[in-house]
Image (spheres, rainbow, N blue to C red):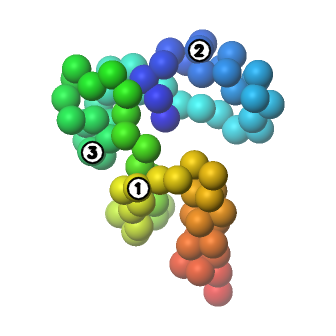
Amino acid sequence: MSFDTPADNQSWAEAQNFQYELWSDTNKNLALYYGAAASQSTTMPSRITKLLDADGTLILEYLSVSVSVHAAEVLEDCQAIFSP
């Protein structure tokens, strides 16, 4: 999620050949709610991840994200949490 417009996110996702949607939070409401922004004047959201269950309950949070390893870290945690 970013503060960029949906059009900007779509252009960037296409340029990167992403196979998933990028969401926009142009009004910063979600960033404020989940703690990725301190105020409406925040220009860039913090890189955090919140893992929620189907009911919206917080299961796990990552407050310090290293982009190079984060996807693998989340996948490993999800497999541990959700695998039978």
Disc 1 and disc 3: Cα gap in Å?
Answer: 12 Å
Task: Give the side of residue 80 with respect to residue 58, left or right.
Answer: right
Q: Name above or below for residue 71 compared with residue 76.
A: above
Amino acid type, residue under disc 1 in the picture: Ser
> Residue 79 occupies which quadrant of the picture?
bottom right
Amino acid type, residue under disc 3 in the picture: Gly
Residue at 49% in and 35% down: 1
Q: For mark 3, what is the residue?
A: 35
Amino acid type, residue under disc 2 in the picture: Asp
Q: Name above or below for residue 81 compared with residue 48.
A: below
Check disc 3: other Cα within 10 Å, few if <14, some if 14-19, many if 20+: some
Q: Is residue 65 visible?
A: yes
Task: Give the side of residue 63 with respect to residue 72, left or right.
Answer: left
Task: Give the side of residue 12 with respect to residue 2, left or right.
Answer: right
Residue 42 or residue 28, whichever sits in front: 42
| Residue 50, x across and y down, in percent | 41, 55
Q: For mark 2, what is the residue?
A: 8
